Amino acid sequence: MKIFIKKVIFFTCILFLFFIVNIVANYTIFNNSKVPVKKANIWIVGDSHPQKGFKPTSFLSAENISSPGEPYIITFWKLKYIFKQKHPDTLIIGFAQHNFSSTNDRKFSDKKWEGTMFERTYLIGNYDELKDIEVNKKSYYNMFLLKMCLYPSTKHFEFIGKYVNSKKSKITDSDEAIKRHFFNKDKTSGLSKTSSSYLDSIINLCKIYNVKPILIGIPVTKVYFDKIPNLYKEQYEIEKKKWSNNHVPVVDMTNTFYADKFYLNSDHLNDIGAAFFSNQVREYFATNNNVNK
Protein backbone atom coordinates (compact mmCIF):
# COMPACT_ATOMS: atom_id res chain seq x y z
CA MET A 1 0.00 0.00 0.00
CA LYS A 2 2.82 2.40 0.86
CA ILE A 3 4.47 1.69 -2.50
CA PHE A 4 1.18 2.28 -4.28
CA ILE A 5 0.62 5.59 -2.45
CA LYS A 6 4.16 6.71 -3.30
CA LYS A 7 3.56 5.92 -6.98
CA VAL A 8 0.28 7.82 -6.97
CA ILE A 9 1.96 10.83 -5.37
CA PHE A 10 4.86 10.62 -7.83
CA PHE A 11 2.64 10.49 -10.92
CA THR A 12 0.37 13.21 -9.49
CA CYS A 13 3.39 15.47 -9.07
CA ILE A 14 4.56 14.70 -12.60
CA LEU A 15 1.08 15.48 -13.97
CA PHE A 16 0.89 18.70 -11.96
CA LEU A 17 4.34 19.75 -13.21
CA PHE A 18 3.25 18.93 -16.77
CA PHE A 19 0.23 21.19 -16.38
CA ILE A 20 2.30 24.01 -14.90
CA VAL A 21 4.86 23.87 -17.71
CA ASN A 22 2.11 24.04 -20.35
CA ILE A 23 0.34 26.92 -18.59
CA VAL A 24 3.57 28.92 -18.42
CA ALA A 25 4.33 28.12 -22.07
CA ASN A 26 0.84 29.15 -23.23
CA TYR A 27 0.85 32.39 -21.25
CA THR A 28 4.28 33.18 -22.67
CA ILE A 29 3.09 32.49 -26.22
CA PHE A 30 -0.06 34.57 -25.75
CA ASN A 31 1.65 37.53 -24.06
CA ASN A 32 4.34 37.68 -26.74
CA SER A 33 2.04 37.26 -29.74
CA LYS A 34 0.83 40.07 -31.97
CA VAL A 35 -2.94 40.39 -32.14
CA PRO A 36 -4.04 38.99 -35.53
CA VAL A 37 -5.98 42.09 -36.54
CA LYS A 38 -4.81 44.27 -39.39
CA LYS A 39 -4.33 47.96 -38.79
CA ALA A 40 -7.30 49.77 -40.38
CA ASN A 41 -9.14 53.06 -40.06
CA ILE A 42 -12.38 51.29 -39.14
CA TRP A 43 -13.04 48.25 -36.99
CA ILE A 44 -16.47 46.63 -36.73
CA VAL A 45 -17.43 44.83 -33.50
CA GLY A 46 -20.42 43.04 -32.08
CA ASP A 47 -22.38 39.85 -32.67
CA SER A 48 -23.58 38.11 -35.85
CA HIS A 49 -25.59 41.15 -36.95
CA PRO A 50 -22.56 43.38 -37.59
CA GLN A 51 -20.52 40.31 -38.53
CA LYS A 52 -22.82 39.68 -41.50
CA GLY A 53 -23.99 43.26 -41.97
CA PHE A 54 -20.71 45.06 -42.64
CA LYS A 55 -18.66 43.94 -45.62
CA PRO A 56 -15.16 45.29 -44.93
CA THR A 57 -14.17 45.37 -48.61
CA SER A 58 -16.88 47.99 -49.17
CA PHE A 59 -14.78 50.46 -47.18
CA LEU A 60 -11.39 51.91 -48.00
CA SER A 61 -9.83 50.56 -44.81
CA ALA A 62 -11.87 48.34 -42.50
CA GLU A 63 -11.66 45.14 -40.47
CA ASN A 64 -14.70 43.22 -39.22
CA ILE A 65 -13.80 41.38 -36.00
CA SER A 66 -17.36 40.57 -34.87
CA SER A 67 -18.34 37.09 -33.64
CA PRO A 68 -21.71 35.28 -33.44
CA GLY A 69 -23.57 35.70 -30.18
CA GLU A 70 -21.05 38.16 -28.75
CA PRO A 71 -22.48 40.22 -25.86
CA TYR A 72 -21.10 43.67 -25.04
CA ILE A 73 -19.24 42.09 -22.11
CA ILE A 74 -16.94 40.16 -24.43
CA THR A 75 -16.69 43.06 -26.87
CA PHE A 76 -15.31 45.17 -24.03
CA TRP A 77 -12.89 42.47 -22.85
CA LYS A 78 -11.44 41.89 -26.28
CA LEU A 79 -11.11 45.59 -27.12
CA LYS A 80 -9.45 46.22 -23.77
CA TYR A 81 -6.85 43.61 -24.71
CA ILE A 82 -6.42 44.54 -28.39
CA PHE A 83 -6.22 48.30 -27.85
CA LYS A 84 -3.03 47.79 -25.84
CA GLN A 85 -1.33 46.81 -29.12
CA LYS A 86 -3.30 48.67 -31.78
CA HIS A 87 -6.57 50.45 -32.38
CA PRO A 88 -8.52 52.02 -35.26
CA ASP A 89 -9.56 55.61 -35.79
CA THR A 90 -13.25 54.68 -35.83
CA LEU A 91 -15.10 51.84 -34.10
CA ILE A 92 -18.47 50.72 -35.49
CA ILE A 93 -20.46 49.01 -32.74
CA GLY A 94 -23.44 46.82 -33.61
CA PHE A 95 -26.44 48.37 -31.87
CA ALA A 96 -29.86 46.72 -31.84
CA GLN A 97 -32.81 45.96 -29.59
CA HIS A 98 -31.64 42.43 -28.78
CA ASN A 99 -28.34 43.74 -27.41
CA PHE A 100 -30.22 44.88 -24.30
CA SER A 101 -32.03 41.62 -23.65
CA SER A 102 -30.99 39.68 -20.56
CA THR A 103 -30.66 36.66 -22.86
CA ASN A 104 -27.09 37.92 -23.22
CA ASP A 105 -26.55 37.55 -19.46
CA ARG A 106 -27.34 33.84 -19.59
CA LYS A 107 -24.67 33.04 -22.16
CA PHE A 108 -22.14 32.22 -19.42
CA SER A 109 -24.37 29.58 -17.84
CA ASP A 110 -26.50 28.34 -20.74
CA LYS A 111 -25.36 24.96 -22.10
CA LYS A 112 -25.88 26.11 -25.68
CA TRP A 113 -23.60 29.13 -25.33
CA GLU A 114 -21.27 28.79 -22.33
CA GLY A 115 -18.66 26.63 -24.08
CA THR A 116 -18.37 29.11 -26.94
CA MET A 117 -18.13 32.08 -24.57
CA PHE A 118 -15.42 30.44 -22.47
CA GLU A 119 -13.49 29.28 -25.52
CA ARG A 120 -13.19 32.90 -26.63
CA THR A 121 -12.44 34.45 -23.26
CA TYR A 122 -10.47 32.02 -21.09
CA LEU A 123 -7.48 34.37 -21.29
CA ILE A 124 -9.10 37.80 -21.54
CA GLY A 125 -12.23 37.48 -19.40
CA ASN A 126 -12.59 38.82 -15.87
CA TYR A 127 -15.43 36.74 -14.52
CA ASP A 128 -15.03 38.01 -10.96
CA GLU A 129 -16.42 41.36 -12.10
CA LEU A 130 -19.70 39.78 -13.27
CA LYS A 131 -21.46 40.11 -9.92
CA ASP A 132 -25.01 40.03 -11.28
CA ILE A 133 -24.56 37.26 -13.82
CA GLU A 134 -24.48 33.51 -13.24
CA VAL A 135 -21.23 31.98 -14.51
CA ASN A 136 -20.70 28.24 -14.80
CA LYS A 137 -17.25 28.20 -13.23
CA LYS A 138 -16.92 24.44 -13.66
CA SER A 139 -17.37 24.75 -17.40
CA TYR A 140 -14.93 27.68 -17.45
CA TYR A 141 -12.20 25.74 -15.60
CA ASN A 142 -12.73 22.75 -17.88
CA MET A 143 -12.15 25.01 -20.89
CA PHE A 144 -9.07 26.55 -19.25
CA LEU A 145 -7.66 23.09 -18.59
CA LEU A 146 -8.32 22.00 -22.17
CA LYS A 147 -6.80 25.11 -23.75
CA MET A 148 -3.91 25.84 -21.39
CA CYS A 149 -2.75 22.69 -19.60
CA LEU A 150 -2.51 19.90 -22.17
CA TYR A 151 -0.07 21.25 -24.76
CA PRO A 152 1.52 24.51 -25.96
CA SER A 153 -0.63 26.24 -28.57
CA THR A 154 -0.58 29.36 -30.70
CA LYS A 155 -4.38 29.35 -31.14
CA HIS A 156 -5.43 31.65 -28.32
CA PHE A 157 -7.26 34.29 -30.36
CA GLU A 158 -10.68 32.72 -30.80
CA PHE A 159 -12.18 36.05 -29.75
CA ILE A 160 -11.14 37.62 -33.06
CA GLY A 161 -14.04 37.21 -35.49
CA LYS A 162 -14.38 37.98 -39.18
CA TYR A 163 -16.92 38.71 -41.90
CA VAL A 164 -18.74 35.52 -42.89
CA ASN A 165 -21.75 35.43 -45.20
CA SER A 166 -23.43 33.92 -48.26
CA LYS A 167 -25.90 34.99 -50.96
CA LYS A 168 -28.63 32.63 -49.75
CA SER A 169 -31.97 34.03 -48.62
CA LYS A 170 -34.66 32.42 -46.47
CA ILE A 171 -36.57 34.72 -44.15
CA THR A 172 -39.13 32.36 -42.61
CA ASP A 173 -37.47 32.04 -39.20
CA SER A 174 -38.77 35.21 -37.50
CA ASP A 175 -40.56 33.37 -34.67
CA GLU A 176 -37.45 31.34 -33.89
CA ALA A 177 -35.20 34.42 -33.98
CA ILE A 178 -37.52 36.45 -31.75
CA LYS A 179 -37.74 33.63 -29.22
CA ARG A 180 -33.94 33.24 -29.20
CA HIS A 181 -33.32 36.94 -28.63
CA PHE A 182 -36.11 38.04 -26.31
CA PHE A 183 -37.72 35.09 -24.55
CA ASN A 184 -36.86 32.62 -21.83
CA LYS A 185 -39.30 29.75 -21.24
CA ASP A 186 -42.13 31.54 -23.05
CA LYS A 187 -41.69 34.75 -21.04
CA THR A 188 -39.80 37.87 -22.05
CA SER A 189 -36.25 37.69 -20.75
CA GLY A 190 -36.19 41.15 -19.25
CA LEU A 191 -33.66 43.92 -19.75
CA SER A 192 -29.94 43.58 -19.17
CA LYS A 193 -28.43 46.30 -17.00
CA THR A 194 -25.09 44.58 -17.54
CA SER A 195 -25.26 45.09 -21.30
CA SER A 196 -25.97 48.80 -20.86
CA SER A 197 -23.13 49.07 -18.37
CA TYR A 198 -20.62 47.36 -20.66
CA LEU A 199 -21.65 49.49 -23.61
CA ASP A 200 -20.73 52.43 -21.37
CA SER A 201 -17.37 50.76 -20.75
CA ILE A 202 -16.76 50.30 -24.48
CA ILE A 203 -17.49 53.98 -25.16
CA ASN A 204 -15.23 55.07 -22.29
CA LEU A 205 -12.46 52.80 -23.58
CA CYS A 206 -12.74 54.49 -26.96
CA LYS A 207 -12.33 57.88 -25.29
CA ILE A 208 -9.16 56.71 -23.52
CA TYR A 209 -7.59 55.60 -26.82
CA ASN A 210 -8.99 58.51 -28.86
CA VAL A 211 -11.13 56.20 -31.01
CA LYS A 212 -14.38 57.55 -32.45
CA PRO A 213 -17.30 55.21 -31.57
CA ILE A 214 -20.36 54.98 -33.81
CA LEU A 215 -23.45 52.97 -32.88
CA ILE A 216 -25.17 51.49 -35.92
CA GLY A 217 -28.38 49.49 -36.03
CA ILE A 218 -28.48 47.08 -38.97
CA PRO A 219 -31.62 46.48 -41.09
CA VAL A 220 -33.80 43.48 -40.24
CA THR A 221 -36.95 42.28 -41.96
CA LYS A 222 -40.25 43.98 -41.18
CA VAL A 223 -41.78 40.73 -39.98
CA TYR A 224 -38.96 40.33 -37.43
CA PHE A 225 -39.01 43.99 -36.37
CA ASP A 226 -42.79 44.00 -35.81
CA LYS A 227 -42.47 41.02 -33.44
CA ILE A 228 -39.86 42.62 -31.16
CA PRO A 229 -41.54 43.16 -27.76
CA ASN A 230 -42.17 46.82 -26.93
CA LEU A 231 -40.05 46.53 -23.78
CA TYR A 232 -36.91 46.26 -25.90
CA LYS A 233 -37.94 48.86 -28.45
CA GLU A 234 -38.51 51.33 -25.62
CA GLN A 235 -35.14 50.57 -24.02
CA TYR A 236 -33.47 50.95 -27.41
CA GLU A 237 -34.95 54.43 -27.78
CA ILE A 238 -33.68 55.31 -24.30
CA GLU A 239 -30.18 54.15 -25.26
CA LYS A 240 -30.31 56.06 -28.55
CA LYS A 241 -31.26 59.28 -26.80
CA LYS A 242 -28.63 58.76 -24.11
CA TRP A 243 -25.77 58.36 -26.55
CA SER A 244 -26.94 61.05 -28.93
CA ASN A 245 -27.02 63.44 -25.96
CA ASN A 246 -23.47 62.35 -25.16
CA HIS A 247 -22.30 63.22 -28.69
CA VAL A 248 -21.87 59.61 -29.80
CA PRO A 249 -23.20 59.21 -33.38
CA VAL A 250 -26.15 56.83 -33.59
CA VAL A 251 -27.34 55.51 -36.96
CA ASP A 252 -30.52 53.45 -36.50
CA MET A 253 -31.51 51.44 -39.56
CA THR A 254 -33.17 48.58 -37.72
CA ASN A 255 -36.52 49.76 -39.10
CA THR A 256 -35.24 50.37 -42.62
CA PHE A 257 -36.62 47.46 -44.58
CA TYR A 258 -34.93 46.09 -47.71
CA ALA A 259 -36.23 43.71 -50.35
CA ASP A 260 -36.29 40.07 -49.24
CA LYS A 261 -33.37 39.18 -51.53
CA PHE A 262 -31.04 41.26 -49.30
CA TYR A 263 -31.60 39.08 -46.21
CA LEU A 264 -29.94 35.82 -45.23
CA ASN A 265 -32.78 35.19 -42.77
CA SER A 266 -35.29 37.30 -40.88
CA ASP A 267 -32.71 39.23 -38.83
CA HIS A 268 -29.44 39.07 -40.81
CA LEU A 269 -28.36 40.58 -44.10
CA ASN A 270 -26.82 38.27 -46.68
CA ASP A 271 -23.74 39.06 -48.75
CA ILE A 272 -25.76 41.10 -51.27
CA GLY A 273 -27.53 43.03 -48.53
CA ALA A 274 -24.28 43.57 -46.61
CA ALA A 275 -22.64 45.12 -49.68
CA PHE A 276 -25.64 47.40 -50.24
CA PHE A 277 -25.86 48.41 -46.58
CA SER A 278 -22.10 48.91 -46.22
CA ASN A 279 -22.13 51.25 -49.20
CA GLN A 280 -24.91 53.25 -47.54
CA VAL A 281 -22.85 53.50 -44.36
CA ARG A 282 -19.84 54.57 -46.37
CA GLU A 283 -21.93 57.33 -47.95
CA TYR A 284 -22.90 58.40 -44.43
CA PHE A 285 -19.22 58.62 -43.58
CA ALA A 286 -18.58 60.64 -46.72
CA THR A 287 -21.02 63.30 -45.49
CA ASN A 288 -19.34 63.35 -42.08
CA ASN A 289 -15.81 64.53 -42.68
CA ASN A 290 -14.73 63.66 -39.15
CA VAL A 291 -15.22 59.95 -39.86
CA ASN A 292 -12.47 58.00 -41.61
CA LYS A 293 -13.70 55.87 -44.50
Image (cartoon, rainbow, N blue to C red):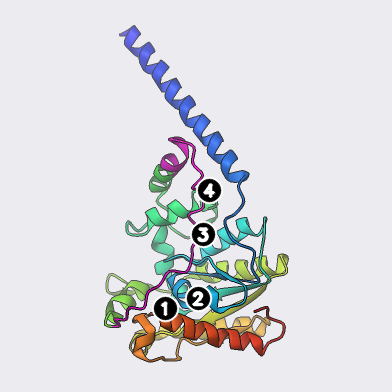
Q: Where does the magenta region start and end?
A: 144-171
Is mark 1 in CB contact (under 8 Å) with mark 4? no
Residue 160 inside the magenta-drawn segment: yes
Name the residue carrying label 1: 271
Which residue type does callout 1 highlight? Asp
Name the residue carrying label 3: 160
Q: Earlier in the sequence, mark 3 or mark 4?
A: 4
Q: Measured from the top left, where is residue 69 in percent x and y?
A: 42, 66
Which residue type does callout 4 highlight? Leu
Q: Quadrant of residue 30?
A: top right
Residue 186 inside the magenta-drawn segment: no
**Number of the front mark, 1 or 4:** 1
* Gap between marks 3 and 2 measured at Cα: 16 Å
Q: Earlier in the sequence, mark 3 or mark 2?
A: 2
User: For numbered disc 3, what is the local secondary structure?
Assistant: loop
Front-most of residues 90 and 233: 90
Name the residue carrying label 4: 123
Q: Which image quadrant: the C terminus?
A: bottom right
Q: Is residue 21 visible?
A: yes
Q: Which mark is residue 55?
A: 2
**Number of the front mark, 2 or 4:** 2
In the image, residue 172 above or below residue 52: below
Q: Measured from the top left, where is residue 74 in percent x and y?
A: 51, 61
